[in-house]
Amino acid sequence: MEAIKKEDAPKKTAVPKAGWRIKIGFTIFIASVTWPILLPILSMVGVSTQAVAAFTGVMAVVAEVMMLAAAAIAGKDGFAYIKQRIFGFIKSYGPPQVVSSARYKTGLVMISLSLLYAFLSPYFAGYIPGWADHRVVYAVVGDILVLVGLFLLGGNFWDKLRALFIHKAVVVIAENPAES
């Protein structure tokens, strides 16, 4: 057995320590992303539509400036820290790469039912109970079915979906699915 040399050993990427510059940059970044929450609140409080529209325009510009300021304050290490924290959080709740057969089939059924409803509802709307009064509810339920179905399908499904758009992609079906 050959000894591993120090230069051949895998290098660990150092996660920067959260100093005051990184914390301020991260706070400014989060503030710039969460500004849109104020828009519905302004409408509910009774602010005029012109004022909300003006605030929206100003907010779009200020949010971009705040993101640039956050990047400048945090620096390269801060950007790496922010990226690691945000994508690490998202990745921890993302779908696993490989899922069970039952989970995969459930996801396919959920998406298929939603798509079937979307295609057939204009033709059979009169036969769907409560459709005329609750169209938005049916649409939201369909969208939720699609999102949950995509999550249930797992990471391998995204590779299959991506392969649809690659001309030279080739399907390889394993002889024994247990081997793959």
Image (tube, rainbow, N blue to C red):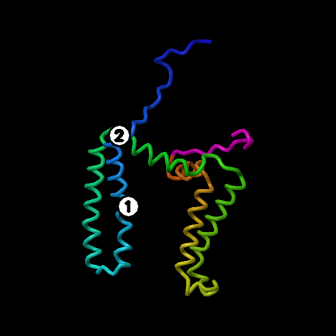
Which of pointers 1 and 2 indicates the residue nearer the eye? 2
Q: Residues within 10 Å of mark 2 (few under 14, many from 20)?
A: few
Q: Residues within 10 Å of mark 1 (few under 14, many from 20)?
A: few
Rendered location of residue 45, percent (x, y)? 35, 79
Residue most extreme to the front:
20
- Which of the image's four quarters has the C terminus? top right
Task: Tell me what residue is drawn at x 25 percent, y 61 percent.
Answer: 61
| Contact flag, marks 1 and 2 (Cβ < 8 Å) | no
Numbered disc 2: secondary structure: loop
Of the residues shown, which amino acid type is indicated by label 1? Thr
Numbered disc 1: secondary structure: helix
Reply yes or no: does residue 12 show up in magenta. no
Q: Nearer the viewer, residue 118 or 88?
A: 88
Residue 153 occupies quadrant: bottom right
First in sequence, mark 1 or 2: give its number: 2
Rendered location of residue 74, percent (x, y)? 31, 43
Point out the stretch of residues depicted in magenta: 168-180
Reply yes or no: does residue 174 show up in magenta. yes
- Which of the image's four quarters has the N terminus? top right
Q: Main secondary structure of the magenta part?
A: loop
Rendered location of residue 146, percent (x, y)? 57, 64
Q: Residue 63 shows which numbered tag? A: none
Q: Nearer the viewer, residue 111 or 8?
A: 8
Rendered location of residue 26, percent (x, y)? 36, 49
Q: Which residue is mark 1?
A: 34
Of the residues shown, which amino acid type is indicated by label 2? Gly
Q: Which residue is mark 2?
A: 19
